[in-house]
């Protein structure tokens, strides 16, 4: 939980810089905001000389490092992993969102 109880509010300057994010974090940000926007922001950070913070949180005792992946199963798909999500394009994602909204509204109106 990131709520501060000392009366101080978070500002934009408390946020972690993009250079401090792991590769998967940058990929996620590129998916949300677009690759060009994130590349432009990274370039601005390097021009301004913003570096990543060195303070890191130690991983929990029961957590394994993210680089350690289990060996691929023999019955897995072509990529070797059976938990790989199916790739959707933008239109499929929007249609799925509309379908779930229609289903939600249908449930709400049926109850009333």
Image (cartoon, rainbow, N blue to C red):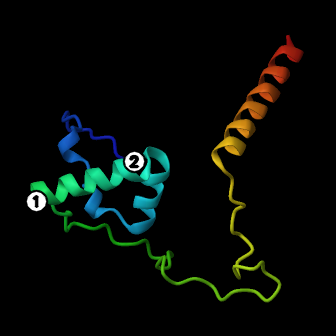
The image quadrant where one finds the C terminus is top right
Q: Quadrant of residue 102?
A: top right
On the image, the x and y values in percent for residue 111 come to: 87, 16
N-terminal of the pair, mark 1 or mark 2, is 2
Between residue 15 and residue 42, name the one nearer to us.
Answer: 42
Q: Which mark is residue 49?
A: 1
On the image, the x and y values in percent for residue 44 come to: 19, 52
Q: Is residue 17 left or right of residue 105?
A: left
Residues packed near mark 1 inside 10 Å, few (<14), some (14 to 19) or many (20 plus): few
Q: Is residue 73 left or right of residue 58?
A: right
On the image, the x and y values in percent for residue 64 come to: 50, 79
Q: Which mark is residue 94?
A: none
Q: In percent of the image, x 43 and y 45: which residue is there?
A: 33
Q: Which residue is mark 2?
A: 1
Q: Give the structural element (helix, strand or loop) at label 1.
A: loop
Q: In percent of the image, x 69 and y 53: which residue is there?
A: 88
On the image, the x and y values in percent for residue 36 come to: 37, 51
Q: Is residue 14 visible?
A: yes
Q: Is residue 70 above or below residue 19?
A: below
Between residue 36 and residue 49, name the one nearer to us.
Answer: 36
């Amino acid at each position: 939980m990131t709520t501060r109880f000392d009366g101080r509010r978070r500002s934009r300057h408390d946020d972690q810089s993009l250079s401090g994010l792991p590769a998967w974090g940058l990929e996620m940000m590129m998916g949300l905001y677009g690759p060009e926007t994130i590349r432009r922001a990274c370039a601005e950070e390097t021009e301004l000389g913003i570096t990543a913070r060195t303070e890191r949180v130690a991983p929990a005792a029961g957590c394994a490092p993210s680089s350690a992946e289990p060996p691929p199963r023999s019955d897995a798909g072509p990529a070797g992993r059976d938990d790989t999500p199916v790739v959707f394009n933008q239109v499929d994602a929007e249609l799925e969102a509309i379908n779930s909204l229609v289903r939600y509204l249908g449930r709400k109106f049926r109850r009333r």
